[in-house]
Amino acid sequence: MGLFDNAVPGGNITKPLMIALGALLVGKMLSGRSAEQPDQQPQAPAPTEANPGDGGLLGGLGGLLGKLRDAGHGNVADSWVGTGQNQSINANDLGAALGPQVIHEIAQRTGMDEQELLRQLSTALPGIVDKLTPNGQVPQQHQVASAFNS
């Protein structure tokens, strides 16, 4: 997976976990979600949590970090972006920050059990976010997306 090698303990990112990370951070992995809604106008609707556009379920990396900060885990999220040691996050805390709808959506798309998904995400996200923010700054959404294409 290039950029994400060695980003997670053990260095192995499974395909379902990569899909989950993409769903959170990029949104491309969710295309085709609303293909048959005849009542919609031909123009693209504005991105929302239910319709992520190209920014993932939470509006991209910045949205993910915002959710963590809003849930009281700002110090943890900031440690992932910063250049120092990454703090860990408990799977249940991550689930509460992301919300049950987002977790359910990702679990459904990956075929993973929700608890297993949260366990793997809580292990992987610190390293992934750290790799995506090498200079301690959140990159533009297109830069995050390109990381998933390499």
Image: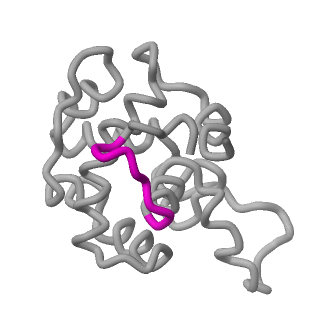
In-image side of 72 versus 42 (left or right): left
Q: Position of residue 126 (x, y in %)?
A: 30, 38
Name the image quarter holding the N terminus: top right
**Residue at point 34% right, 43% down?**
8
**Quarter residue 86 falls in:** top left
Check the image and report above or below for 50 versus 111: above
Against 118, is 4 above or below? Answer: above
Q: Is residue 10 above or below residue 20?
A: above
Residue 103: x %, y % from top left: 34, 68
Check residue 12 for magenta coloring: yes
The number of callouts visible is: 0
Residue 22 lies, in percent from the top left, at 53, 54
- Left or right: where does residue 56 sit relative to residue 146? left
Secondary structure character of the magenta stretch overall = loop
Q: Quadrant of the C terminus?
A: top right
Whether residue 10 is in magenta: the answer is yes
Image check: 145 left or right of 62? right
Which residue occupies the foreground of this view, 26 or 70?
Answer: 26
Q: Residue at x 48, y 30 (%)?
A: 132
Q: Which residue is rendered at x = 45% and y = 24% of the image?
A: 133
Q: How is the image coloured?
A: one colour
Residue 6, compared with residue 112, is above or below; it is above
Q: Which residues are magenta?
A: 8-16
Q: Residue furthest toward the right? A: 42
In percent of the image, x 46 and y 52: which residue is there? Answer: 58
- Is 43 placed left or right of 142 in the picture? right
Q: Quadrant of residue 20?
A: bottom left
